[in-house]
Amino acid sequence: MAIEIRPATDFTDVKALVGPKRPDANVCWCLSYRIPSKQNQQLHGTERGAFVKKLLAEDPPPGILAYDGGEPVGWAAVHPRADTGFATNRRIPHVDGQDVWSIWCIRVRPGHRGNGISHALLAGAVHLARTYGAPAVEGYPVDNAGQKVDLTMAYVGTRKLFEDAGFTKAADTESVLNGFPRVLMRLDLGR
């Protein structure tokens, strides 16, 4: 299997990964950390998809997609932390004043999990951040110590996934997800 990573610019492919089955449903669309909480709560149904379509036209894009034989099979959200909810999140600390990028969602479609796609997505997210001059990249995965993480909560990744990609723990957080503490993992890109 040759996984191809591309910037997320195709609405149909992004919708296949993070959009709802029904257009009027209020699913995340990977907006909950990307935009301010108040704005996120005000967007309903098809407004959410329309907002994502607008984000896909921006430079830099809001994330990356993984493809297997042309089929979209994975998504990772990556963007400058200053443009996300993590800029003001009181539970996730700032390590320093650098203009770091955040990776907050890694999603692989059912039927494609267990094939290393999350590793390819994380590497692709790092590459996108590096391409745009990010001095460092952060993720906020669960520190699950090898225990099973509920699939609906696994979108943040695990500490091991980030360690395997060269990230190191930079700080503890006050955030807990699925009963596991989240840690701030960081990869300095050495501009």
Image: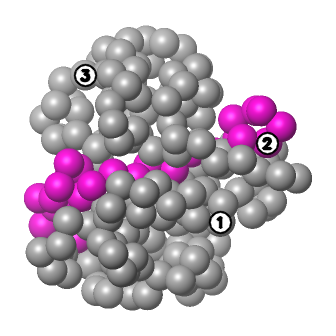
Is 85 included in the stretch rendered in magenta?
yes
Query: Is any atom of residue 45 visible in this view?
Result: no
Q: Nearer the viewer, mark 1 or mark 3?
A: 1
Task: Check the image and report above or below for 41 versus 157.
Answer: above
Q: Give the mark nearest the N terminus, 1 or 2.
A: 2
Residue beneath disc 3 = 43
Task: Check the image and report above or below for 170 versus 165.
Answer: below
Residue beneath disc 1 = 119
Inspect the image, locate mark 3, and give the three-letter code of the amino acid beneath it: Leu
Magenta-highlighted residues? 67-92
Contact between marks 1 and 3 (CB within 8 A): the answer is: no
Residue beneath disc 2 = 68
- Density class for disc 1 (Cα within 10 Å; few <14, some 14-19, many ≥20) is some
Q: Nearer the viewer, mark 2 or mark 3?
A: 2
Q: Which SS class for mark 3?
A: loop
Task: Please name the residue shown 54% across and 25% down the image.
Answer: 10
